[in-house]
Amino acid sequence: MNKRNLLILGSFFLLFLAAGCTPECTAEEIASFHPILLSPPNGSVVEYDSPPTFQWTEEETCVPSQYDITFLKDGVSYEHFRIDGDLTNFNRSNPLQPGTSYEWYVEAVHAYDLEGGYGFIYGPPSAVWSFTTDGFCSSASELNQPILVEPQFGEWVNSSPGPGPASINIEWSYSGPCLPDSFHYQAASDPEFTNIITTGTTEWNVHSVKLQVPKCARIYWRVQARVGNDSGEYSEPSRFTFSSIPSCFQNQASIDAVLIKGYVFDDYCKSTVPYVPEGVDIWPPCTVDEFGVHANGARARAPGENETTGEEFPAETGISGVVVDLGSGPCPSTGLDQFTTSNNGNYYFMVQSPGEYCVSIDKTKNPKLDHGIWTLPLTDQEITEATIVFNPGDEIIFQNFGWDQNDFLIMNFHVAVNSFCRAGDSKEHLAVVEVPADTVIPIFARNEDATWFAAFVNGRRCFISVASGTPEGDPDGLLLYPIQPTPIPIEPEAELKQCSDYKTEDACMRNSCEWVQSTFGSGHCIKP
């Protein structure tokens, strides 16, 4: 071979090396081949449902035939993967378990031909690194309610004929920022779950189970998530019926129970004020009425935008920790049952006898509802309530409650002398209610010179003079009440002959009439 050909061959060899084609390791070289782990970092926490890329490097002058990656769980080797030797990263296809500690290491492998197959020589293993997967909740406060899927509420299930209990599959779903350790289920013959038929526990990733129950039975069931010994809230209960024999239930209506359920949600209005402004357009999700400007009582489950103004408004989420009362008969009524709303603001009651029931919320029992207005059902009183009518054959009745929390200042006013709270900011306005001395009332607005304050007294709005007492704070921070009602002319009492002619509570009561208070304003006088 001449010089020219040698130069050309040498050039190709140099280009071959420059292209990174490192020769394969021999058996002797593999014996001292040390992989160096890079990521995930030793001792790190990784997402269980999105495993990281496992990476390593080496400082050798050759490449192995293959790499072996070994994973250990609880100190025991349980998974091995083999990849080509020119790769230094690995993506798992097998899922990791949540809340689990793992270890891993890498070995270089030299493969050589044998008669009928291959032989393998392993180099020394890399350092052993560890990582932990996230996923499991750490406390019951992080748990959500499971959602019951099958059987559906009120479903009648036909089981196979024959003696003995029947088997039916119940199924639920779960979603949340973290996972429970396990699920606990109950099946009972009554909606109060006092007569338990069967109960049990499943692993965190098991969302169904077969129940053994009598073939002629009305079954109520529910599921809760758990973390260790701590339990989350039970799901809303569901009900299904086995009816394999026609004579099981002659009168379905007489044994049906109904689920009363709903949400207590944070009703949004950017411009909530306790008066009716003049010359200002009010757009959804706000509305205006005799109570002022407030949210419209229609729950927005997703963020939205006003098509006219372009104003964006948020999704109206549930309010947790609100005490909801159930009473027997029409409202007002309490004492039958009570439920504290869950993390997503929902509540439920299961009742078995057709009739009327009262569902109500008392603001004074719920410190987080410090000041605002009930928008569903709409009222400016402390208590909002709804009468529910349960007829035979009904299965689910919905009743939501909307609360518009406002951020304007409210302070206490200490009444020093017996005073009248009036319909406006002068003595020319009618007296709405008498306020005894040594009474503390909330005030939320003032007139321009802070000589009269808008107050809440016995659930009614009225004005009281600053001369009647002392505010606890600086009244300049209160809302400026821009509109005062025009005083109602008061006729001389000597000319009055009928109860309806008296315009003040004092005159009404002095003349043996009865004064009827209204939610807002002066009220009126009637004949007893």
Image (cartoon, rainbow, N blue to C red):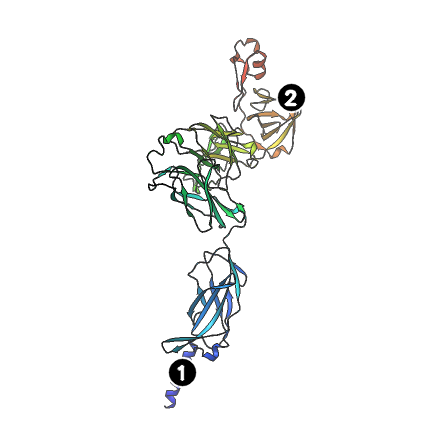
Rendered position, 57 above or below 3: above
- x, y percent for residue 222: 45, 41
**Res. 311 in view:** no
- The quadrant of the picture occupied by the N terminus is bottom left
Q: In this view, does 209 lie to the left or right of 496?
A: left
Q: Which mark is residue 244?
A: none
Q: How many labels does the image show?
A: 2
Residue depicted at 51% across the width and 66% down the height: 38
Between 517 and 177, the residue placed more toward the observer is: 177
Name the residue that disc number 1 marks. Answer: 11
Q: Are marks 2 and 1 in contact (CB under 8 Å)?
A: no
Q: How far apart are marks 2 and 1 (CA)?
A: 110 Å
Between 95 and 226, the residue placed more toward the observer is: 226
Residue type at mark 2 is Asn
- x, y percent for residue 78: 46, 63
Circle 1 SS class: helix
Which residue appears farthest toward the front when viewing the image?
163
- x, y percent for residue 117: 37, 75
Name the residue that disc number 2 marks. Answer: 418
**Res. 333 in view:** yes
Rendered position, 131 above or below 366: below
Residue type at mark 1 is Ser
Residue depicted at 51% across the width and 68% down the height: 37
Q: In this view, does 188 lie to the left or right of 437?
A: left
- x, y percent for residue 526: 52, 14
Which residue appears farthest toward the bottom when viewing the image?
2
